[in-house]
Amino acid sequence: MIVRKLSEVATVEWGNGLSRRFLLESDGMGYTVTDTVVRAGTKSRLEYRRHLEACYCIEGAGEVVDADGNSHPIEPGTLYALDQHDAHFLVAAPDSDLRLVCVFSPALKGDEIHRLDSAEFSHY
């Protein structure tokens, strides 16, 4: 059995916020669970080429925008899933951080970060 508290997990500055990574590849579960904070007022150009991801909003507000420009509001109680390795923009509202519980499959190694200074979608 694995039991972890937020204060005990690895915290990674992923590019526009923090990713607290509860389960990693080394845990042998096959997926990762994170508690992710997206800083207020940020826009992140993201794509996961090796992972599928689902995110459940527990705090704050924002939107996820697909590569075609379709916007989907995010607020507490909203889940979005990137089931096709979708390139997307993750946008946090200007006045509050966005907090998400995310699941990645396959699992993350744990040290992945985004490079957000490129014109391309950041990926890992």
Image: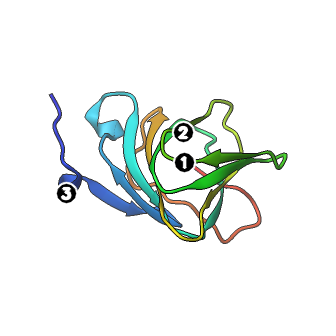
Point out the image quarter for the N terminus.
Answer: top left
User: Badge 2, how many Cα within 10 Å: few under 14, some, many 20+?
Assistant: some
Tell which of 75 and 11 is nearer to you.
Answer: 75
Image x and y of residue 87, in percent: 71, 46
Residue at 28% of width from left, 56% of height from top? 10
| Earlier residue among tags 2 and 3 | 3
Gap between marks 2 and 3, in whole Å? 25 Å
Out of 67 and 47, give the one closest to the viewer: 67
Three-letter amino acid code of the residue under disc 3: Ser
Question: SS at mark 2?
Answer: loop
Residue 7 got which mark? 3
In percent of width and height, residue 6 lies at: 23, 52
**Kind of residue at disc 2:** Thr
Looking at the image, is mark 3 or mark 1 earlier in the sequence?
A: 3
Where is mark 1, residue-wise? Answer: 75
Left of 42 or right of it: where is 9?
Answer: left
Amino acid type shown at disc 1: Glu
Q: Residue 116: x percent and y percent?
A: 63, 67
How far apart are the alpha carbons under marks 3 and 1? 25 Å
Q: Secondary structure at mark 3?
A: helix
The residue that disc 2 covers is: 78
